C-alpha cells in the first residue's frame, strides 16, 4: 500500500480512537483559515468522525476574506460557521490608549489569533465540541505560532508531522491540489509567503527536522536559533498528538 495512504489511515484512526476514548459524542471544531493545515485537518476529522460531527469556523479579521474556507467546508460536506472578529478587534483598538506604552507591532498582531482561539472554545462549548489544534511540527519547531492562540487546542492531528507529511495526507484524502499545495502565509494585511519570511523553504526545514541535515550552514544556524528561542511555546502547551511511525 502507498505510504501516504498508510500515514493518512493511521492519522484518521488516531483521531477516531482519541474521540472514542475521551469524548465519544463530541464534535470536532476546526478554525478554518483556508490554508492547507486546517483544510487537511477538517478532512481527516470528517473521515474519522463523519461529516455531521465536524464544524468549520471561519474567523476573518479586519480586511480579511474567507480564503476559500466556505468552499472547503462545502466540498467536505461539513457545517460552516462564520464569525468575523473585526468588531472585537475594533473594541480593542479603541482601548489602545490604555495599553502600556511601548506595545509592539508583533504584540498587536498576536491579538487576533488569541481572539480566534477564545471564540473557537466558545463555539465548542456551545455545540458540544472539542477544538482541534491544526499546527504542524515544522511550524512548531521554529515557533511559527502564537502562544495561547493558534498553538492551542485540545487534540493535534499534525503536531508531530512535518509540513510535507500534512500535504501527503491531503493528497491521500483526494483533496483538490490547489488547496493542499496553497502557498502558506499568515494572512495578515501586506503579508508575504511564509518561506520568504523564513528565508528557507519548508522542504529544507522538514529535511532538517527529520534527518538532521541542512546543506547551508547559515540556514541551519537560523533554524537552530529559532528553535532555541521558541521552544518554550510547545514546552508550555502539551497537546495530545498523533505519533507517526517513521
Image (spheres, helix red, strand yellow):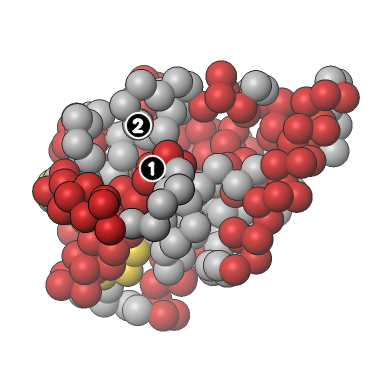
**Which is in the foreground here, disc 1 or disc 2?**
1
- Residue 3: x %, y % from top left: 63, 38
Q: Does the image show residue 47?
A: no
Residue 182 placement (x, y as % from top left): 41, 23
Q: Nearer the viewer, residue 222 or 169?
A: 222
Residue at 59%, 68% in the rendered image: 236
Compared to residue 17, the image places residue 105 above or below, namely above
What residue do we see at 37% from left, 46% from top? 108
Badge 2 local density, few (<14 within 10 Å), some, or many (20+)? few
Q: Which type of secondary structure does the marked residue at label 2 adopt?
A: loop
* Residue at position x 22%, y 47% in the image: 93
> At which x and y percent is residue 120?
26, 61
- Above or below: residue 76 compared with residue 182: below
Foreground residue, 91 or 116? 91
Query: Circle 1 sits on which residue?
Result: 109
| The N terminus sits in image quarter | top right
The percent coordinates of residue 70 (x first, y second) are 17, 36
The answer to whether 172 appears left or right of 214 in the picture is: left
Residue beneath label 2, please? Answer: 188
Q: Residue at x 50, y 47 (%)?
A: 145
Q: Determine if residue 82 is in view.
A: yes
Q: CA distance from mark 1 to mark 2?
A: 8 Å
Tag 1 and tag 2, C-beta contact below 8 Å: yes
Q: Secondary structure at mark 1?
A: helix
Left or right: residue 137 versus residue 123 is right
In primary-sequence order, the first of circles 1 and 2 is 1
Q: Horizontal placement of 185 versus 25: left or right? A: right
- Badge 1, how many Cα within 10 Å: few under 14, some, many 20+? few
Amino acid at each position: 500500500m502507498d505510504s501516504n495512504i498508510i500515514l493518512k489511515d493511521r492519522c484518521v484512526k488516531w483521531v477516531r480512537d482519541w474521540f472514542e476514548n475521551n469524548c465519544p459524542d463530541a464534535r470536532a471544531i476546526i478554525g478554518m483559515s483556508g490554508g492547507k493545515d486546517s483544510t487537511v485537518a477538517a478532512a481527516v476529522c470528517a473521515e474519522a468522525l463523519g461529516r455531521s460531527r465536524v464544524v468549520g469556523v471561519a474567523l476573518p479579521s479586519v480586511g480579511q476574506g474567507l480564503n476559500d474556507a466556505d468552499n472547503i467546508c462545502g466540498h467536505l460536506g461539513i457545517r460552516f460557521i462564520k464569525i468575523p472578529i473585526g468588531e472585537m478587534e475594533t473594541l480593542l483598538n479603541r482601548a489602545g490608549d490604555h495599553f502600556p506604552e511601548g506595545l509592539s507591532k508583533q504584540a498587536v498582531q498576536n491579538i487576533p489569533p488569541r481572539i480566534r482561539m477564545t471564540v473557537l472554545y466558545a463555539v465548542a462549548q456551545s455545540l458540544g465540541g472539542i477544538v482541534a489544534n491544526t499546527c504542524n511540527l515544522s511550524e512548531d519547531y521554529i515557533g511559527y505560532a502564537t502562544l495561547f492562540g493558534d498553538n492551542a487546542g485540545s487534540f493535534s492531528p499534525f503536531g508531530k508531522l512535518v509540513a510535507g507529511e500534512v500535504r501527503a495526507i491531503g493528497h491521500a484524502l483526494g483533496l483538490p491540489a490547489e488547496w493542499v499545495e496553497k502557498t502558506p502565509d499568515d494572512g495578515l494585511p501586506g503579508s508575504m509567503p511564509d518561506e520568504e519570511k523564513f528565508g528557507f523553504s519548508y522542504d529544507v526545514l522538514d529535511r532538517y527536522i527529520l534527518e538532521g541535515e541542512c546543506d547551508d550552514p547559515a540556514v541551519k544556524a537560523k533554524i537552530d536559533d529559532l528553535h532555541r528561542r521558541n521552544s518554550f511555546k510547545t514546552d508550555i502547551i502539551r497537546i495530545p498528538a498523533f505519533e507517526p511511525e517513521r
